[in-house]
Image (cartoon, grey):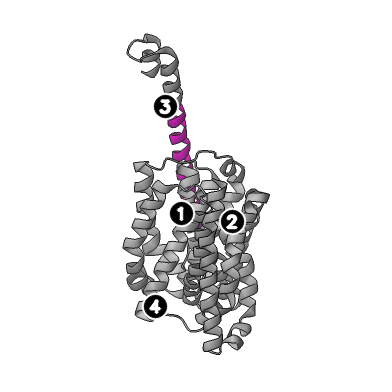
């Protein structure tokens, strides 16, 4: 098996060779070296973002979006488009690395999420995203990821203790993935460029109680798929924000290696420290956004943000409660099966029959 894993990594190296060849062609043929160097700060930011993309359920756009929107004061739509562009390299590279290493994935929920996202993401980008004001995009991103960070800071130990590998043929997980992929693709991904990875990850660890070693790679793959889908839709309609190409030129060669590096390194140092740091950064960007939009936070604006934050946290808690109940039923079922195996048929064991009743 180890030999096969090493052999399959050749496909990942082939992908890197193709990508860097195309990138060099764009630099040389288009005389874009100056443009790439002018955006060196994005390469620096995405060096951190790409590591987080490979080692956590947070795409590279989770760092790229606030850097562009909050630090460089770019429009939220620019942050969304850059998220699509940069993740189509970083998350795809990490996904290929994951597949080549034959890491275990939650296939049942992943298949559902892929189908749901495929059906709704293009419509969301074309029809829904243009209707959302820039301020709402910025606040939606801040609240969604801020709530995610707060929940992790409160429940990190419980989340990291999950050990279930997942059922690759579970119809419930498929349906949940289908609904989440469809909802996130049309709304969150279309508007911010990220989000489906976080929602699928949350469903896996909170509802299905899946091990992080399975849940995080699964979230990386679904985000890679949605990013490529976003790039295809944006390219077909020619609706890219100005300046995205320069940022992409600078960041792409970094994330192509940074995201897979996150996948590899986190297997050595563990996920808990990385998740703790990223969760803290999610909370920081929420506070940063609220302070930068001080006028919008006055009056009803601040209360609406607080209400949205509480709704997100309540949603996470509902998933957790359902997941705990589902885990108890799974353990009870496994215990009954073991007892039946030891004592014979349920029909012939009156004590077991009475206990099941």
Q: Quick one: label 3 or label 4, which is nearer the N terminus?
A: 4
Mark 1 lies on a secondary structure that is helix
| Foreground: disc 1 or disc 4 | 4
Q: Is residue 311 magenta?
A: yes
Mark 2 lies on a secondary structure that is helix
| Foreground: disc 3 or disc 1 | 3
* Residue indicated by mark 2: 263
Q: Quick one: label 2 or label 4, which is nearer the N terminus?
A: 4
Mark 4, other Cα within 10 Å: few <14 / some 14–19 / many ≥20:
few
Residues at discs 1 and 4 in contact (Cβ within 8 Å):
no
| Residue 342 higher or lower than 215, as above or below | above
Give the alpha-carbon distance from disc 1 to disc 4, as whole Å.
26 Å
Quadrant of the image containing the C terminus:
top left
Quadrant of the image containing the N terminus:
top right
Mark 2, other Cα within 10 Å: few <14 / some 14–19 / many ≥20:
many
| Residue at the image position 47 percent from the left and 48 percent from the top | 105
Residue 95: give its label. none
Q: Quick one: label 3 or label 1, which is nearer the N terminus?
A: 1
The answer, for residue 58, to whether it is visible in the render is: no
Give the alpha-carbon distance from disc 3 to disc 2, as whole Å.
34 Å
| Residue 85 higher or lower than 4, as above or below | below
Residue 199: give its label. 1
Q: Quick one: label 3 or label 2, which is nearer the N terminus?
A: 2
| Residue at the image position 40 percent from the left and 10 percent from the top | 351
User: What residue range appears in magenta?
Assistant: 309-333
Q: Is residue 19 magenta?
A: no
Residue 235: give its label. 4
Q: Quick one: label 1 or label 4, which is nearer the N terminus?
A: 1
Residues at discs 3 and 4 in contact (Cβ within 8 Å):
no
* Residue indicated by mark 3: 333
Q: Quick one: label 1 or label 2, which is nearer the N terminus?
A: 1
Query: Overall secondary structure of the magenta stretch?
Result: helix
């Amino acid at each position: 098996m180890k030999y096969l894993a090493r052999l399959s990594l050749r496909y990942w190296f082939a992908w890197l060779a193709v990508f860097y060849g195309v990138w060099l062609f764009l630099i040389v043929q288009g005389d874009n070296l100056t443009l790439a160097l002018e955006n060196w700060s994005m390469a620096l930011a995405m060096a951190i973002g790409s590591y987080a993309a490979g080692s956590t359920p947070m795409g590279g756009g989770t760092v790229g979006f606030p850097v562009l929107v909050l630090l460089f004061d770019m429009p939220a739509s620019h942050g969304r488009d850059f998220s699509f562009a940069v993740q189509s390299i970083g998350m795809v590279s990490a996904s290929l690395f994951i597949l080549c290493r034959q890491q275990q994935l939650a296939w049942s929920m992943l298949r559902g999420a892929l189908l749901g996202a495929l059906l709704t993401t293009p419509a969301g980008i074309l029809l829904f995203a243009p209707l959302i004001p820039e301020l709402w995009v910025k606040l939606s991103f801040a609240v969604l990821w801020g709530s995610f960070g707060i929940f992790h800071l409160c429940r990190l130990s419980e989340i990291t203790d999950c050990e279930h590998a997942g059922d690759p043929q579970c119809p419930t997980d498929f349906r949940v993935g289908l609904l989440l992929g469809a909802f996130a693709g049309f709304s969150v991904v279309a508007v911010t460029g990220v989000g489906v990875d976080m929602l699928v990850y949350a469903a896996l660890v909170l509802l299905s109680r899946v091990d992080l070693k399975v849940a995080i790679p699964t979230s990386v793959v679904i985000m890679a798929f949605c990013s490529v889908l976003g790039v295809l839709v944006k390219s077909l309609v020619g609706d890219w924000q100005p300046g995205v190409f320069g940022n992409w030129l600078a960041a792409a060669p970094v994330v192509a290696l940074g995201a897979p590096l996150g996948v590899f390194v986190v297997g050595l140092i563990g996920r808990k420290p990385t998740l703790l740091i990223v969760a803290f950064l999610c909370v920081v960007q929420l506070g940063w956004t609220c302070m930068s939009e001080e006028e919008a936070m006055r009056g009803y604006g601040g209360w609406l943000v607080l209400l949205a934050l509480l709704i997100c946290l309540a949603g996470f808690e509902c998933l957790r409660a359902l997941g705990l109940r589902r885990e108890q039923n799974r353990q009870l079922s496994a215990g009954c099966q073991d007892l039946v195996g030891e004592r014979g048929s349920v029909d012939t064991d009156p004590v077991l029959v009475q206990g099941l009743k």
